[in-house]
Image: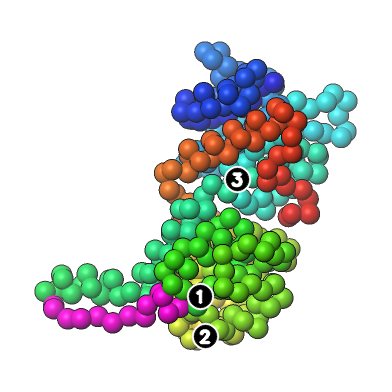
Amino acid sequence: MDVLVTEYQLTHHAERFRQAAPHARFLSMAPDGTVRDGEQTLAWEDVPAEVAFASTDLFDGDLRDDKIRHFFGWLLRAAPDPDADAPAALRWLHLAAAGVDSPVFGMLLERGLRLTTSHHTAIPISEYVLAQVLRARLPLDAMAADRTTRTWRTQDWDEVASSRWLVVGMGAIGTAVAERARAFGAHVTGVRRTPAGDEPVDALVGPDAIDDVVGDHDVVVLCVPATASTTGMVGDALLARLAPGTILVNVGRGALIDEDALRRGLDKGTPATAVLDVTAVEPLPEGHWLWDDERVVLTSHTSSGGRQRYDRAAEVFAANLSRYVAGEALADEVDLTDR
């Protein structure tokens, strides 16, 4: 069995991978977009991998670079093709991300490729959410300005411990956000279509109840993927239901929010602050209003940037690789109904 991973992952985690699949041959993708079998360079057309690991480091840098273009081109050629006579070599793709809303993943699933995801970025994303909410509620900028101007005065703020949070989506990321918000003393309501019964929240509602409860919360955090049912879920109607002073945080997908409606909502004070790590178009075009609006905290899809994510991603893949070799069910396997 041949397994394709990045050069970074193989350099740092070869022993872990080989323990999971002792008889596998590991091929590596170099940063320049070439594939190597030890010292030998392979043409992409000749890469015979049965398993591929699209780790986080694969996407470091420009999404249009040679490494990514070659990899996704190879995926589409190597994945099963019902119209082809010969069987495909590639059978399983492990993706070091939680979201599979890109059309390419739907195409791969339809062709019969097995696809698994990873939730190793829940920790940094949840830390990002907490940091941004704290910054929005505490006058940290004003405190820093007072030091610059040599002004000695006290500052007041609304404590996170007194706040009420609505966390939309209780997957790994939403769960991590809820745990950390509750650790600060906040009251958390989770939104989940199918409750598991162990969600770390004070209350749990279904998606059809969002309109009824959203106005009772000070912080609304979006942690869901973009699907047919969630795309555009935050529009004029929902924003009109927000309480004045609400902080809206989106760490899901940019498509969840109607950005024109958001601008109208901000003008009305609902929300008072929007924290956006994702936007409808990425990279955000020059001249877009989100760049300059002081009511918006804008970051470049970087909430998952905890450096420890690389090691966690390798652990998750190695565990699933061990299951694959043993013929066991894979963790976090995606099917077409999940999109």
Q: Is residue 73 left or right of residue 131?
A: right
Horizontally, residue 325 falls left or right of residue 147, namely: right
Q: Residues within 10 Å of mark 2 (few under 14, many from 20)?
A: some
Query: Closer to the observer: label 3 or label 2?
Result: 3
- In the image shown, does 73 or 318 lie closer to the viewer? 318
Against 71, is 188 above or below?
below
Residue 45, visible in the rendered structure: no
Instruction: Report the Cα–Cα distance between label 3 and label 1.
Output: 28 Å
Relative to 239, is 98 above or below? Answer: above
Look at the image and tell me in which quarter the C terminus lies.
bottom right
When asked about the image quadrant of residue 241, the answer is: bottom right
Pinpoint residue 95: horizontal percent, then vertical percent.
62, 41
Q: Position of residue 34 (x, y in %)?
A: 55, 24
Secondary element under disc 2, as helix, strand or loop, is loop
- State the residue at coordinates (62%, 81%): 213
Instruction: Find residue 238 and name its label.
Output: none
Residue that label 3 marks: 118
Judge the density around disc 1: few (<14), some (14-19), many (≥20) Cα neighbours within 10 Å: many
Coordinates of residue 85 in the picture (x, y in percent): 88, 25
Sequence order check, earlier mark of 3 and 2: 3
Residue type, mark 1 in image:
His
Q: Find out whether the residues at labels 3 and 1 contact each other: C-beta distance under 8 Å.
A: no
Q: Main secondary structure of the magenta part?
A: loop
Residue under numbered circle 2: 243
Residue 188, given in percent of the width and then of the height, sits at 53, 72
Question: First in sequence: mark 3 or mark 1?
Answer: 3
Identify the residue position indicated by label 1 in the image. 187
> Residue 29 appears in which quarter of the rendering?
top right
